[in-house]
Amino acid sequence: MTDKYTQLVSHGLGRNVARKLGLPQPALLRRYKPGQALISGPILVQGASAGAEELAAILLSWDLDVRRHAVPREKLGAIILVMDELAGPEDLEKPVLSAASSLRDLAPSARFITVSRPADGAGTPSGAAARQGVDGFLRSLAKELRAGATANGILLPEGVSATSPSAVAALRFFLSGRSAFVDGQFLTVSTAEGRLPSDFEKPLAGKVAVVTGAARGIGAAIARTLYRDGATLVLVDVPAAGDHLAGVANEVHGTALQLDISREDAGQRIIDHAVQRHGHLDIVVHNAGITRDKLLANMDHSRWSSVLNVNIAAQLRINQALMASEHFRDSPRIVSVASTSGIAGNRGQTNYAASKAGVMGLVRATAPLLAHHGGTINAVAPGFIETEMTARIPLALREVGRRLNSLQQGGQPADVAEAIAFLASDAAGGINGTVLRVCGQNVVGA
Ligand code: NAI
């Protein structure tokens, strides 16, 4: 699915006309490709804490061009602002204004990343105010950046250092083209768990991953991305999508399992297939989902129950089977696809939004249960993504949906897939029970 308008206004005559008429000018985003440099341009690491110093040393060890002080008029690939020792609101001004003076030097598709601590746990009202202040600051800055640049934050509770594996992995994710459509978001690293890969190009090497709803759209993109990152794939979809499913399975050298995930025995069927065909099971991505939109006044039993059944009840049953299985015990990962509709609500989608909000609730509550087995469960909440589903939306509505975010464009299925691949990796072992939005900072739902 393409967004022809973005192509048209990204260069030449189209760009000039859009500029003159004051029309949105979405940038062509820098998306990850294997072998691509992590970031194009020097990285300015600001902040006086030990955390800032340690992160700068890690970036240097990756052979990146790192600055601890701005060089006037030098184009920057990224600014990392480490504010992990804020004691009160007065501590915000110095780092923030010092970063401000370099903003005009950011290159296209540059990154601005804060590293700070969550307000809970600050111990004093003044500390909490400062920490929460970073939230408003970063989300506003993300709305000010242009040319495909994004701003995101990493939150580290007390006891989790800036150099813990998942903090470093999150930093790498936010710096890279893998996070092209993630904007204005915070990712909490809750523990020092996690292991960085020996090969950053193949972070899922040796893993067996199941993706539901993999015959098309976002699910097929997830399959391709996990395969690219080294995983062996089991692809699940309904029998009616069997031909497409086989096509994607062939492409990623995986196996296809024709299965309606709302069947009572779906969890066991998935485990049996993965173990019999591939020896083990490490990652499950709950992507399959349906919409049956109607205003609530016209809602009927079938529309309500089918959506709740496929989008939540099936996941709950499959998770139960997974957690009861001895084959899902070695740092297992579950990633669920939610939706920004479940955060902000959407007219005509009471059933769908209830189901997707439900997904976020189940993820939070399942996190401690999975942590018991050294595992994690997280959700990704996509905003407007260019798929067959959104291509069916009437043109005017579709245009509104795709432009109402800080990047002024819809995301690609691969953008959702990149976030899922990151959360499914060993390096993300310290991230558990969170929701990461992949929405270009959609104005809907903050
Ligand atoms: P899609 O409709 O193109 O693909 C969904 C796939 O799931 C289809 O292949 C379908 O056959 C399969 N599926 C449906 N019910 C199933 C069942 N009972 N058992 C097995 N497979 C089943 O949808 P799309 O756009 O790729 O969305 C994927 C996920 O992303 C869904 O959970 C959707 O709610 C979510 N999402 C999509 C957004 C978008 O903008 N496209 C935005 C936010 C969330």
Image (cartoon, rainbow, N blue to C red):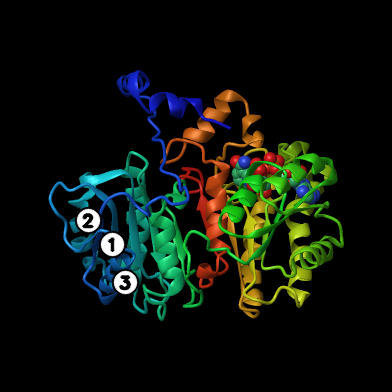
- Per the rendering, the mark at residue 204 is none
How packed is label 2: few (under 14 Cα within 10 Å), some, or many (20 or more)?
A: some
Side (left or right) of 387 relative to 169: right
Residue 305 lies, in percent from the top left, at 81, 49
Element type at mark 1: strand
The residue located at (52%, 47%) in the rendering is: 415
Q: CA distance from mark 1 to mark 3?
A: 9 Å
How packed is label 3: few (under 14 Cα within 10 Å), some, or many (20 or more)?
A: many
Element type at mark 3: loop
Q: Which residue is mark 2?
A: 99
Label 3 near ligand 1 (CB < 8 Å): no
Q: Of the residues shown, which amino acid type is indicated by label 1?
A: Leu
How packed is label 1: few (under 14 Cα within 10 Å), some, or many (20 or more)?
A: many
| Total marks in image | 3
- Tell me the quadrant of ligand 1: top right
Q: Which residue is mark 1?
A: 81
Residue 88 lies, in percent from the top left, at 26, 71
Q: CA distance from mark 2 to mark 3?
A: 15 Å
Q: CA distance from mark 1 to mark 2?
A: 7 Å
The residue located at (43%, 49%) in the rendering is: 177
Whether residue 214 is visible: no
Q: Which residue is mark 3?
A: 84
Element type at mark 2: helix
Whether residue 384 is visible: yes
Q: Of the residues shown, which amino acid type is indicated by label 3?
A: Asp
